[in-house]
Amino acid sequence: MQVSRILIPAAFFQQVWLGSSIFLSWIVAPILFSRFGAEIGADVMGAIFPVYGWILALCSGICAAAAAIVFQSRSQYGPKASLAGLVIGSVSFLLALLQAFYVFPRSHALRLVVKGGRASGNIDAVSEQAAEMMRLHGLSMTINMGLILAAIFMFWYFQHNLRRLGR
């Protein structure tokens, strides 16, 4: 199988991964929270995040698979870059799955509990859940920044290998 047949579609999915991450994190979220306030912004982002998590998992998984194929032909394309692409692609895929299957659903469930506690005036009863929700939010932001940096690396990685194929 020709590696270029794998790298070109993988580069597309890498661009979807990077573009959606930057668009959601640095354009959509700030606009939502500044224009509509924390409550509505959080509701809208809570509706978007499950789909976003699946998109990241799909795109990073495809990039990890492409990196594995390039790694198999590493003697031709450079062993260090190939190993780095394989490791970063695989770790990104696992982090995206963690976010999609644990962080986002757990945060959403806790947010509903905290929201209900605040509505009933029972703020003290949900303070522990609010603290856990904030911890998960911090974890989500850290993972998301790591995924953005990984997507930038994968951009270089695919471009580097596609250039080498052109020689």
Image: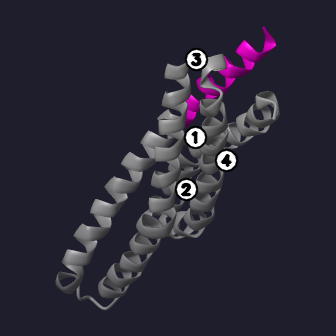
Mark 3 touches mark 1? (CB < 8 Å): no
Please give the residue where the numbered disc 1 appears in the rendered image. 22
Range of residues picked out in magenta: 151-167
Location of residue 139 by image quarter: bottom left
Circle 3 Cα neighbour tier, 10 Å, few/some/many (<14 / 14–19 / ≥20): some
Whichever of callouts 3 and 1 sits on the residue coming sooner in the sequence is 1
Which residue does the image show at 49% across and 56% down from the upper left?
33
Whichever of callouts 2 and 1 sits on the residue coming sooner in the sequence is 1
Q: Which of marks 2 and 1 is in front?
A: 1
Which mark is drawn over residue 109?
A: none
- Amino acid type at mark 4: Ile
Q: Does the magenta stretch include residue 153?
A: yes
Image coordinates for residue 94, horizontal then vertical, percent: 48, 54
Which sits in the foreground, 117 or 132?
Answer: 132
- Taking the image as drawn, is residue 34 in sight? no
Please give the residue where the numbered disc 3 appears in the rendered image. 78
Q: Which of marks 3 and 2 is in front?
A: 3
Q: Is residue 156 above or below residue 61?
A: above
Whichever of callouts 3 and 4 sits on the residue coming sooner in the sequence is 4
- Amino acid type at mark 1: Ile
Q: Is residue 35 left or right of residue 161?
A: left
Label 3, secondary structure: give it.
Answer: loop
Q: Is residue 136 above or below residue 69?
A: below
Location of residue 152 by image quarter: top right
Q: Which of marks 3 and 4 is in front?
A: 3
Q: Disc 3 to disc 2, how far (Cα)?
A: 44 Å
Q: Is residue 68 left or right of residue 16?
A: left
Please give the residue where the numbered disc 2 appears in the rendered image. 32
